[in-house]
Image (spheres, rainbow, N blue to C red):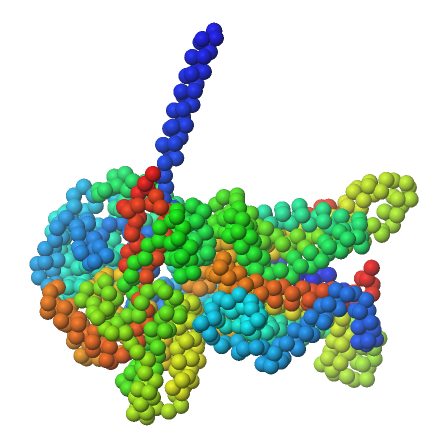
Amino acid sequence: MIRYILRRILFLIPVLIGVAFCVFTLLYLTPGDPARMILGDMATENAIKEFRAKEGLDKPFLLQFGNYIYKAITQGDIGRSYITKRPVMNEIMATFPATLKLAAFAIVIAVVVGLPCGILSAIKQYSVFDTLAMIFAMIGLSMPVFWLGLLLILLFSVHLRWLPPSGFDTFKAMILPSLALSAQSISMITRMTRSSMLEVVRADYIRTARSKGQKESVVIWVHALHNALIPVVTLCGLQFGHLLAGAILTESIFAVPGVGRLMVESIKMRDYPVVQGGVLFVAVAFSVVNLLVDLLYAYIDPRIKAQYR
Amino acid sequence: MKKCSLKKCGLVLLAFAFLLGGAGVAAAKDILIVADQYDATTMDPIAHNDVPSSRACYELYDTLVFVDNEGNVSPGLAESWEFLSGTEYKFNLRKGVKFHNGDEMKAEDVQYSIMRATTDAGAKIATYSQNVKDVEIVDDYTIVVHLKLIDYSFFSSLAHSWGSVISKKATEAAGDSYGMNPVGTGPFKLVSWQKGNKYVLERFDDYWGPKPQYKTLEVRSVPEPTSRTIALETGDADIAFPIVHNDLKRVGENEKLVLYRKPQNSTAYIGFNVTKKPFDDIRVRQGIFAALDIVGIQAASYRGIGKVPGTILPSAVKYSINDEIPPHVQDVEKAKKLLEEAGVKDLKLEIWTNERKERVDSATIVQAQLEEIGIKSEIKVLEWGAYLNGLMEKTHDLFILGWVVSIPDPNFAVAGLLETSAIGASNYTFFSDTALDELLREGRSLPDGAGRQAIYKEMQLYLNEQLPMIYLHNDESIAGTQKNVKGFSPRSNEIHSFREVYFEN
Amino acid sequence: MSDYSAAAPAVTGRKSRRGLAEVLFRLRKSPLAMFGLIFILCLAFVAVFAGVLAPYPYQKQNLMHSYETPSRQFWLGTDEFGRDILSRLIYGARISLQVGFIAVGIALFVGGMLGAVAGYYGGWIDNGIMRLMDVLLSVPQTLLAIAIAASLGPGLFNLMIAVGIAAVPNYARIVRGSVLSIREMEFIEAARAVGSSDLRIILKHILPNSMAPIIVQSTLGVASAILNAAGLSFIGLGIQPPYPEWGAMLSGGRQYIRDYAHLTLYPGLAIMLTILALNFLGDGLRDALDPKLKR
């Protein structure tokens, strides 16, 4: 198991270097000179030259990239923001808690709502509830988060005056963004729980349990659920990763000071190091969450655990 | 026993009442919450040239002199001053002024602050600092600023946030991270700053001047106009700005709120690239101007906010004749005639603008009106960085941009925009005119008075005729506050001040 | 939306050969899928004939009629310039469908070729290509699209490329999976025996036989491409303001949401219904193309 984990982590390194390379190339090709953007209209040619030299922007592309990777690996230094001059890592770490909170809230809501709906749907397959749940899940999947966000603001902030439309300092202010962000995950978890339950219910051991005369509720809640949950747990993990990254739009609607908003602002201000660092950071977070999901998967499903030795 | 308990009850009640009363006193507003549009980018006074950062710096730092809305100068960190000559200003510093870290402010700090602004670290505010030659320390409380050239506009520019006095020791210690760790002498010091969300300042109890009446100043960035107004309505914010046009009535008519409107020292304009044919021909520029219903365009894009400028100087800038020029009248026939004289036929052009909604709106209407005199145009909306870069490359035709005059001196309203020396910096029309350059030089070389006034009047009229740019809009600073917020008044350069604000119960 | 790829069937092989009729017949049994199909066909019709159907040109301003609520003159009301919202939505359908289909086209072409080559040749080619796909997959799709859009700059064409490239790995994986399972089948061996070139085998035999999962993924992919594009426009990295892209319309109207909610209501509804229709259709197609998954 430990060897497996180590192998996975080792495998992560080339992937991340690849990500760094892609992002680096993209931003390198972006029109717009960061030196002029940062120094402003009045900057002298000399100042711009010096800035380029200081930030290494005058070096050949591969050298710039190599330098970046070298520093990242040896010193954990992924550059400094052009704007605030702080290490990019500080900038990201200052915004990450908000994103993490947002994503965590959203996943909790998604599980609390999605799981029971999925189970109920499966138990009462083809019932009115099932049909409605499936249609709503589809609507949830199709709902653009930025539109849902605006509708929530319109209803809860403008008309009912219950919840604030921005600010992420209080519990109350976190409700709307989390709700908006969770909609897609609720739908996915509902759908996945339902189909997974249905599959399990047809399985042989459930038939065996039934034929042994166990109560239907025991069959459903003990035998079926336990096995049906395995893929659902995986989905939840994957969803959490997506939420971490996908919060960009939600953050910009509700003015949540998270990583997504930091990146959008940085793109607009040509603060390349922050954009690079941000994408890299999200990729790491995403990969780590995926790794954890795989491990969890192995943990709850003994059949898979055996393969990892 | 019973009596005793009664007494006890009374005591408990009394204590409870005190507690409540005490709580009541503590709950008396001791925090001012401001909803701004954007967060500050840095709190280093010379590393920015944007308004939200300048607002933060205004509370954290002091400048040698203060300038009010009307351009009147009053003593700041300098108690008095003396013009030794056109290029030498002597300042007598206030004694016993403390920095937030407890050190006393001395001549060395002032010298350091001003000279630092002349290095590349101050590239963004070079327009103000480029003329400084040296700062001489006479003694701990006396300095002399030496300029390279005579420039009477320099003095009042010291009140801009670039002239903030920073602590030499603290700045050198902080190095590159100074922008996040400011140390000034202002009435507030930085407590925490959550980038992109809010910064929290606290009253500096050793402040040399009048201390603010509340303890904590919290400035939140709320980019969505709707959210800002809601924050005001629900009482989540005490002051909110800018208020957009469709919320004016909502805030103005709300009994619990007060709406403030103040003409702003800024000019949005449609510039011509005068180095490109046919816009090098004055008749083409005048023809295009004649074809446009500027009054209609301004009204439709800005919807009741601001006004159409008459000249390049916003009304509150010294020597402005902005309000004396009769409104422009669209004259399509004249436009056609001028273009014909210039020999221009089937003209196709591009109108560039950044994403700001009102500017895109203006461009859209300009496009429609130009079509009436047979000019086909295409609008290019560019993201800010790409926009500035594109303008540097000289390929543009018409472009919409704005200019904020932070210091109400006419020199700063024109020099950075149209002087030959500003080509390569913020002169995107590439207008290079010896007559104008001469006027600007003369204007700087004269102290305030009738002579200076005459020069700037001539300059304004000259530019109206030369038309390197068509003036589109003088903006307004619009803010809303709770009714109990007193002592607040928006400033015409948008560097609103919160140090004088207090709450009325 | 990458979970769709996981849900897509691995292989169906020759079943898709039975033709369109069979698939349509199965599809007809699902009312939701039929709704989706009809909606998309109608939308395509509207998009193609936008010039005829729209009551006004999309850019036609009428400042006397700003912010009007729905009326007989303006069925869905007007925006801040007095532009007819219905007309803008109709032209917007053209843009959204274009973006959706062309982006998926790009993704399908690039991803499909990469996947086919990887699966067909195997070995280090396979390894190299798929590791590159892993790299792209480790950045969430929306973020990848944002990064690409930011570097290309705004504009319709750039938007398509950004959204398309971001979706490449999904198709590469599916096609590779299909190719791997078909590669060793007899008819491929036969083709090879008669001396067909590799390219011919890939194009003529392998790709057509991995059509089923590709069709399902593409349908759902169009949905997520439209959604991504609208999101990018919403944060200002997509289409330029004068053009009536739905996401851009939503973004432009958000300032007026309190007074004139119809400015944001209709574009949002248009996006949602389109995505919904595509999702229903995609689900229906999955069931129709792969009876094994049908319950």
Task: Examine the rendering and report whether any part of residue A53 can be seen.
Answer: no
Q: Indicate whether B332 appears above or below A213.
A: below
Q: Seen in the image, is A207 located left or right of residue A246?
A: right
Q: Seen in the image, is C159 located left or right of residue C189?
A: left
Among the 4 quarters of the image, the one containing residue A139:
bottom right
The residue sitting at the top extreme is: B1
Residue A171 or residue C28, whichever sits in front: C28
Q: Position of residue A25 (x, y in %)?
A: 50, 69
Number of numbered discs: 0
Q: Seen in the image, is B93 located left or right of residue A251?
A: left
Q: Indicate whether C188 appears above or below C131.
A: below
Question: Residue at coordinates 86% horizontally, 40% vertically from top-left?
Answer: A215
Q: Seen in the image, is B267 located left or right of residue C82?
A: left
Q: Position of residue B120 (x, y in %)?
A: 29, 63
Question: Residue at coordinates 83% horizontally, 50% vertically from top-left?
Answer: A201
Q: Position of residue C185 (x, y in %)?
A: 82, 73
Among the 4 quarters of the image, the one containing residue B353:
bottom left
The residue sitting at the left extreme is: B84
Question: Residue at coordinates 29% horizontally, 52% vertically from top-left?
Answer: B489
Task: Examine the rendering and report whether any part of residue C113 can be seen.
Answer: yes
Q: Position of residue B149 (x, y in %)?
A: 14, 67
Residue B430 or residue C200, whichever sits in front: B430
Question: Residue at coordinates 48% horizontally, 74% vertically from top-left?
Answer: C242
The residue sitting at the front extreme is: C72
